[in-house]
Amino acid sequence: MKNGVVIVGAGHAGVQAAAGLREDGYDGPVILVGDENELPYHKPPLSKTFIKDQEAKPQPLRGEAFYTGSTIDYRPGIRIDRIDAGRRLELSGGGVLPFDRLILATGSRPRILPLPGSELSGVVSLRSLADARLIRALSAQSEDVVIVGGGFIGLEIAATLKAAGREVTVVEAVDRLLGRAVAPVIARHVRQRLEATGVRILTGTMIARLEGENGHVSAAITTSGERLPAQMVIVGIGVVPNVELAQAAGITIANGIRVDQQMRTSVPEILAIGDAASYRHWLTGGDVRLESVQNATDQARLAARTIVGHADAFAAVPWFWSDIGDMKLQMVGLISGGDSHVVLGDVNENKFSIYHYAGNRLLGIESVNRPGDHMLGRKMLGAGFSPTLQTVATGPDGLKAALAAFQKEEPVRAAE
Ligand SMILES: Cc1cc2nc3c(=O)[nH]c(=O)nc-3n(C[C@H](O)[C@H](O)[C@H](O)COP(=O)(O)OP(=O)(O)OC[C@H]3O[C@@H](n4cnc5c(N)ncnc54)[C@H](O)[C@@H]3O)c2cc1C
């Protein structure tokens, strides 16, 4: 393969794919192209620590030596505009880049809020390091911040900016926080604790328009007419996958760039991974597009294996975390379709886990400040082990013993 592998997108997925190719012994050219002018960096700290600390530095995914020592040809600040039929990429500044295999790791971008006033300065969203730098700078000049959207990112930012001394109001259109992503008991718990710190939360409320002075936002007006003062409005209403490159090349799109169990798109020499990719999940049989660091890195490892000739199917257990103020939320598995649950720990102590079941099958575990339950959950779901509700009630020690007994009885399945 003389042109080698080109990876478009130098985020969590793209960088891991480059690393995976070298780890799996691929010795052809590996070219990593990204449109940001940065050393690729970790995104999660942006909403948790970076925006409140004027001195905080970005955390690189890999040190600079990675891009030279492991012979990854990293090309920052280059946008790919088109994939042509002759296995070539067209670069935005002119020029073409040929490839033998292509990995699309283009991620996702914030959903736009189509509101009167959203063009005002001070109206921002958070996806990239550049966005985080802007929010940090605006935060220094803002007393009041309105956050539109009560999802993970919005709530992380709310907690972070409240801790930095801002007056923060979260406006969420539906009647609960965190959408359908977590159980209602977690959504209520997060709300109570955030409100206890002084974050104002308006659910079932929409913003009708934004007002400004001299071109800069000054207030958000709700549909019921309340005027919320704001020198910064942060829009966090979800993301849309970056599928346009693939779509224009005729690749199948279905809520993301559709991939099979080896991360191949409908054009076999082109693979897709990370936030941009959608696929049938092995755990539930449902179609998903997951937005998490774990999903991005595990898919990247698999894409590299596919390229070097392995035929493993994607079988990673999905997990996710979010830090909202003093709550470390960790989720493992996919809980939709559950019909019962059991709670371990104490909600009042801000330390509990919810085990979700469909019939006798453990679907997933959501934990607040109980990392041990989360780690054990990853092992149980990875082994295909569903403890009974009685075993869950015995707590971590009983669960560990039951898992060990299961793995002894079913070593083959557990090792898969
Ligand atoms: C603020 C924030 C906090 C988060 N916190 C968590 C967390 O706590 N836990 C968790 O699991 N997940 C978290 N996430 C989600 C996680 O970061 C994403 O799921 C992950 O980054 C997805 O990786 P990716 O490589 O698919 O996409 P990205 O990391 O977004 O990388 C895609 C890259 O491709 C580039 N690109 C796109 N199109 C082109 C093109 N045509 N040419 C060149 N380059 C292109 C983009 O600019 C970007 O640099 C967070 C995300 C954000 C924004």
Image (cartoon, grey):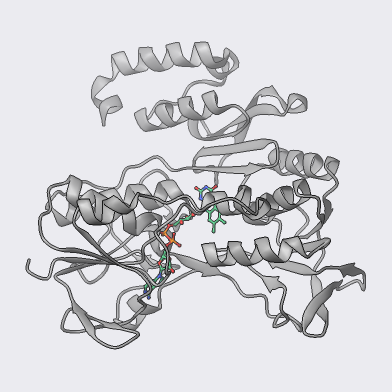
Q: Is residue 412 above or below residue 175?
A: above
Q: Residue at x 47, y 28 (%)?
A: 375
Q: Is residue 117 above or below residue 352?
A: below
Q: Position of residue 50 (x, y in %)?
A: 60, 52
- Give the quarter of the figure containing the C terminus: top left
Location of residue 212 by image quarter: bottom right
Examine the rendering and report whether any part of residue 198 can be seen.
yes
Q: Is residue 148 left or right of residue 144?
A: left
Q: Is residue 42 left or right of residue 137?
A: left
Tell me residue 179's x, y (percent). 66, 54
Please provide percent x and percent y for residue 270. Answer: 23, 68
* In the image, residue 244 above or below residue 153: below
Which residue occupies the extreme front position in the image? 55
Residue at left offset 52%, top offset 69%? 109
> Quarter-wise, where is residue 369 in the image?
top right
Which residue shows up at 78% across the image and 26% down it?
A: 348
User: Residue 243 sits in which quadrant?
Assistant: bottom left
Q: Is residue 260 above or below residue 398?
A: below
Q: Is residue 180 visible to us here?
A: no
